[in-house]
Amino acid sequence: MIVAERKPLEEIADMIAPYKKVTVIGCRSCVAICLAGGEKEVDMLVSAMNLKNRKDGRDQVLEGLVVERQCEKEWVSEVEAKILGSDLVLSMACSLGAQTIGDMHPSKLVFPGLNTGMFGVPEEQGVWSEKCMGCGNCIIHTTGGICPIARCAKNMLNGPCGGSSDGKCEVNLDVDCAWYAIHERLKLQGRLELIETVNEPKDWSTSHSGGRRIYEREDAKLTPHQKRGKEGSR
Amino acid sequence: MKAGSNLEKVFESGRFAVTAEIGPPQSANPEPLVHHSRMMKGSADAFNLTDNQTAVVRLSSIAAAAIIMREGIEPVIQMTCRDRNRIALQSDLLGAAALGVKNVLCLTGDHQIFGNEKGAKSVFDFDSISELKVFDQLRRDGRQSGGNIVTDPPKVYLGCAENPFATPYEFRAMRLAKKVAAGADFVQTQAIFDMDMFERWMDEVRARGLDKKVHILAGVLPMKTAGAARYMKNKVPGMIVPDHIINRMKNASDSKEEGIRLCVEQIETLKAMKGVHGVHVMAVMWEEMVPRIVEEAGLLPRPTFA
């Protein structure tokens, strides 16, 4: 899932200070699961801002609401009136949600309440870790199911480097060395030969290096007729 | 001969090779390079020019090579993958070769978190093994990684680094084998303090026949103080400094002299070790000791070739 963190309250307060009517919109998907921008976090932010505004004597009006998935237009449409009626939308979704609202309402200001971080997984209560960088050409079947691109600080394809110390990464000794982990996993699976061959340089053109990516599925697209029908049903 | 560098000639002659390290200055002043060149000339077969080591901005290794070549000493340029993608790496290799650089050390590079530009965007398009493979293909077939053929391929002797003291230990000789398969002609090891562990690594290296395929330069690092030894033990990932070394430094009446003695003893041990073809002396911020260490280790004069 997409893992994000809420911006510090002070930064949010400064960012939204000039606007009177602020709609704070959360999302029930990834950012709710990572405790950054779900219903509870939206309520908490609105309360904290109300308290701060009262203390600072600012007459800002905040309203909080949550949509099911802020990255999908259908769900955002449901709160269109609230968006149009506000001076500013503070999105508590990931940047995808904030950009979806912005693209649907280009004249409205949509500011980010979160810092969107990574594709990660919950490791334990309150801990999330990065495991994929979306390179567009998955190779984890050759690396024991562990992604070296995302989990090695140097994105190495032929690790571990000389900084692997007691199985930890030199960049952060609290973090496991990805290639140490790959070695151990392949050993467990009896597939160490996979780490013994030289991996060719990666073709990064399938990643963001190849430019902004747009995936299309012809078989999933609506025909012009179907599109007209869908618009008519609203 | 692949490149005909002095270093290659020393290895090919079967003599025990010596290389040393020169860190380019953090300024546009070429004087420290000239000073170090004159001071160390004749005490090593080639001199490593580090490439923004520990991710601190310095005068570039290729420019530094051009400067020290004017002083009549041979460079080994370090080229890391941290700051350059494959376009820049290959371009710089062509440029360096055109300037007369004949030895290139392929490194993945220290992460920028260790340096003074922590906000830098890292590149790491290649790792050291990809770099070796592409450079080897470029020098042999004139073929760039994108497939273009160059008419005048760079004539370079390719090196790499390996750390016998990083985990997993059981993979470290294998990793050298990968570098050899990718095209490495020589390897410099991480600084050795745990000689027993290094011997165990060499056993594996020899068992795989790698000492017959790649020239091995054992890394040594003279220390000035026991504090430096402790720092390397505790703070530098992938470095192992046994307590007996730290104690020896601590108990010495003159720790600098002890550091030199220790380094010379290490070189003597390495000279006798089967499969070790030379030493790489990393006298960081202590370059003036290199001629003395090399002399006391009985490695002078250095061979010359007509």
Image (cartoon, coloured by chain):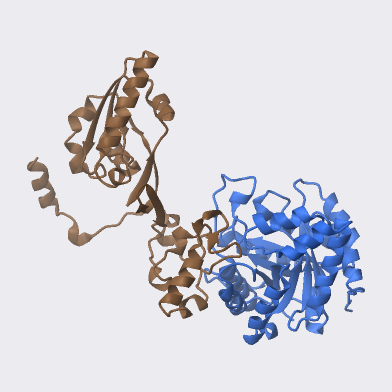
Chain colours: A brown, B blue
In the displayed structure, would residue B151 be above or below residue B73?
A: below
Q: Nearest the camera: B64 or B15?
A: B15
Q: Can you see residue A35?
A: yes
In this orientation, does residue B5 appear?
Answer: no
Residues B230 and B287: in front is B230
Q: Is residue B123 left or right of residue B253?
A: left
Q: Position of residue B10 (x, y in %)?
A: 81, 78
Residue B280: quarter of image: bottom right
Along the viewing direction, whichever of A129 and B90 lies nearer the viewer: A129
Where is residue B156 drawn, in percent x and y? Answer: 70, 72
Q: Where residue B45 sits in the image (x, y, percent)?
A: 83, 71
Dividing the picture into quadrants, the one containing residue A160 is bottom right
**Quarter of the image with the N terminus of chain B in it:** bottom right
| B31 sits left or right of A167 in the view | right
Q: Would residue B43 appear left or right of A36 to someone viewing this image?
A: right
Q: Is residue A161 left or right of residue A109?
A: right
* Position of B15 relative to A151 (above/below): below
Image point (68%, 55%), residue name: B53
| Relative to B26, residue B108 above or below | below
Which residue is at a point 88% across and 72% down the rendered structure image?
Answer: B297
Q: Name the residue located 28 percent from the left edge and 41 percent from the top edge.
A: A100
